[in-house]
Structures are given as structure tokens and as C-alpha cells.
């Protein structure tokens, strides 16, 4: 890729993330909320296993969306101070309205364009890296925000370990089509499986832990939050991403799948914990 091509990719906004209309804001608000409600318990359990997380006192969530996840972290780990930033004015407005508390602060800011303060013990990027294009820039910004020995926590889906029973081929094909769309925009979604190796290859960075998180649910799923989440993902792909697909067939397939009493779903996540530089001496 030439420098000019790379510059155009970095400048091009991801249509998937647009929240300027009432419809797009509503779609994202619903999906973000459901992803917290459905995945939270397993993610909290994984964070409990991390000494770096347990010792952190100041946490920044880059791309905090509607603030629901950061508020849940604050309830689960109340001794920490939390700051959330996001490019979306609409989502930050929802975060401030619904979750503004003494230990929580939200602000409109572009993580990649805002100078870091070097005062955070943890930077969290949950389902954000997949929408960005320049891993080196992401890591440089994270390093600028982190205090010595601080940790970067990246949470992303592991599609290769996820799946439904009975199979949902139309839904799966839609996700593959979205990955192809993201690849054309230079997004990191197609490189998620290689993230640990890519991070380790950057000067000064090392992987502390690479944790697998499995969220299993049994059907039937009609009227369930999981069914609503799958519908929400399909809705975002149809109305936000900008690629052609038979989305009606996806919704019909999901409705049939949700009625099956023996249905099963596994959604796998990956929690990558990385560190820049050497760890300081252990805190007292």
C-alpha cells in the first residue's frame, strides 16, 4: 500500500459507526446495550483474573459508546476512577444522561487525535479496534495515555470459535460479507486473529495475556436478548455498512432459528492484555 493510499484509508470514516441520524443512533444504542447485558458476567470474570486490572486505579475507555459498559465496570470494581471518550456526540449524550456519576466522566473526543495524559493505569478498547485501520497509531496513543506499567485491554469477537446450532448460514455469510467490506476499507477486523502477534511486533509492546471468553446460551431464543442482538447486528449491516445482501433472508432465518427448542449459541470473545515498556515495582 502506498503512503497516499494509506492516508486516504485513515481519512475515510467508517460508515458503520455513523450515529448522526436518529435511526443510526437508536440502532447503535440497542446493540451496545445488548452486548453489555449478554457478555458482561463472563468479561468481569476474565478481568478478575488479571493482576494488572485489579491494581489499576484510573481507567480510560476509548470508544465508550453509550457508557453502559463503563458504568457496569464501575459497579463491579467501585474503587477505580473511570473516564469514557467517544467521537459520537449522540452516544456521549446518552452516556452522560444515563450513567453520569462521581466516579464516571464522559466526553466527546477522538482517541486517535487527542493528546494522552499519561495518567491512566488501564486503557480499554472494547469492539473498537476492528473498526480502525492503523494499529501502530492505536498503540502509540494508548502508550501516551498509560502511566508506566499500565495495561491496554482489547476485547474483540473471535468469529472462528463462534457459531449457532442449528447452523445459520445466511447470518454467517452476512458476517463474512461485512468482513470483506471492512477489508476494503483497510479496517483491522480482518486481522483480529493476528492481533497478539502484531502487537508483539511493535517496539516496546508485549502481550501479558490472551484470554478466551465463551458465552453460551440455549434456546429457544424467541423474544430473548440474544435474538434481539442478532437482529441488531443484521440491522447495522443493512442500514449502516453499505453493502448489498439479502438481509430479508437473514432475518427470516434468525426468526426460524429462534423458535427451535434445542437451539444453541456460542459467542466467543478474545481479551488481549498488552503492556508498553517495563512493569514498575509492585505496588504496596
Image (cartoon, grey):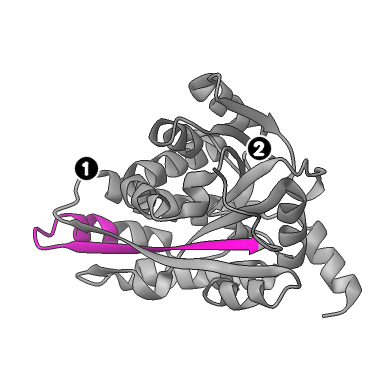
Q: Nearer the viewer, residue 100 or 78?
A: 78
**Which label is found at residue 119?**
none
Q: Quadrant of residue 93?
A: top right
**Label located before the other in sequence (1 or 2):** 2
Q: Is residue 146 left or right of residue 21?
A: right
Q: Is residue 242 visible?
A: no
> Which residue is found at the position 83% from the left and 70% from the top?
6
Q: Residue furthest front?
A: 284
Most extreme residue toward the right is 4
Compared across the picture, whether 110 is left or right of 78 comes to: right
The residue wearing badge 2 is: 85
Q: Please tell me whether mark 1 sits on a helix, a strand or a loop.
A: loop
| Image quadrant in which the C terminus is located | top right
Q: Is residue 256 magenta?
A: yes
Residue 241 pos. (x, y %): 58, 57
Q: In this view, does 214 lie to the left or right of 274?
A: left
Where residue 150 appears, as percent x and y from the top left, is 64, 52
The image quadrant that residue 31 belongs to is: top left
- For the point 60% across and 54% down, which residue is it? 151
Quickly name the residue at label 1.
223
Measuring from the top left, give residue 33's x and y in whole percent. Answer: 42, 39
Q: Is mark 2 on a helix, strand or loop?
A: strand
Q: Nearer the viewer, mark 1 or mark 2?
A: 2
Above or below, 95 against 176 in this view is: above
Q: In which quarter of the image is residue 273?
A: bottom right
Residue count near mark 1 (Cα–Cα under 10 Å), binned few <14, some 14–19, many ≥20: few
Query: How much space separates mark 1 and mark 2, taking CA atoms?
Result: 32 Å
Magenta stretch, residue numbers: 254-275
The one nearer the camera, 143 or 283, is 283
Amino acid at each position: 500500500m502506498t503512503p497516499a493510499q494509506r492516508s486516504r484509508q485513515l481519512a475515510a470514516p467508517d460508515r458503520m459507526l455513523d450515529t448522526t441520524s436518529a435511526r443510526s443512533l437508536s440502532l447503535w444504542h440497542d446493540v451496545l446495550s445488548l452486548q453489555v447485558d449478554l457478555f458482561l458476567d463472563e468479561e468481569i470474570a476474565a478481568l478478575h483474573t488479571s493482576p494488572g486490572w485489579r491494581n489499576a486505579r484510573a481507567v480510560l475507555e476509548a470508544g465508550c459508546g453509550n457508557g453502559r459498559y463503563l458504568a457496569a465496570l464501575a459497579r463491579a470494581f467501585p474503587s477505580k476512577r473511570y473516564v469514557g471518550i467517544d467521537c459520537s456526540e449522540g452516544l456521549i449524550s446518552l452516556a452522560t444522561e444515563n450513567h453520569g456519576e462521581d466516579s464516571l466522566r464522559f466526553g466527546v473526543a477522538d482517541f486517535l487525535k487527542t493528546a494522552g495524559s499519561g495518567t491512566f493505569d488501564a486503557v480499554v478498547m472494547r469492539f473498537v479496534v476492528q473498526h480502525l485501520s492503523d494499529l501502530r497509531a492505536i498503540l502509540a496513543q494508548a502508550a501516551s495515555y498509560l502511566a508506566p506499567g499500565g495495561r491496554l485491554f482489547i476485547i474483540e469477537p473471535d468469529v472462528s470459535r463462534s457459531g449457532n446450532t442449528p447452523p445459520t448460514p445466511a447470518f454467517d455469510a452476512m458476517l463474512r460479507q461485512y468482513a470483506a467490506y471492512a477489508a476494503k476499507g483497510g479496517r483491522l477486523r480482518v486481522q483480529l486473529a493476528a492481533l497478539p502477534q502484531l502487537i508483539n511486533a511493535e517496539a516496546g509492546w508485549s502481550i501479558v495475556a490472551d484470554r478466551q471468553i465463551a458465552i453460551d446460551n440455549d434456546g429457544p431464543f424467541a423474544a430473548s436478548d440474544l435474538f434481539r442482538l442478532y437482529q441488531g447486528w443484521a440491522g447495522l449491516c443493512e442500514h449502516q455498512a453499505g453493502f448489498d445482501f439479502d438481509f430479508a433472508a437473514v432475518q427470516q432465518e434468525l426468526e426460524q432459528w429462534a423458535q427451535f427448542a434445542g437451539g444453541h449459541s456460542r459467542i466467543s470473545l478474545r481479551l488481549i492484555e498488552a503492556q508498553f515498556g517495563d512493569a514498575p515495582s509492585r505496588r504496596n
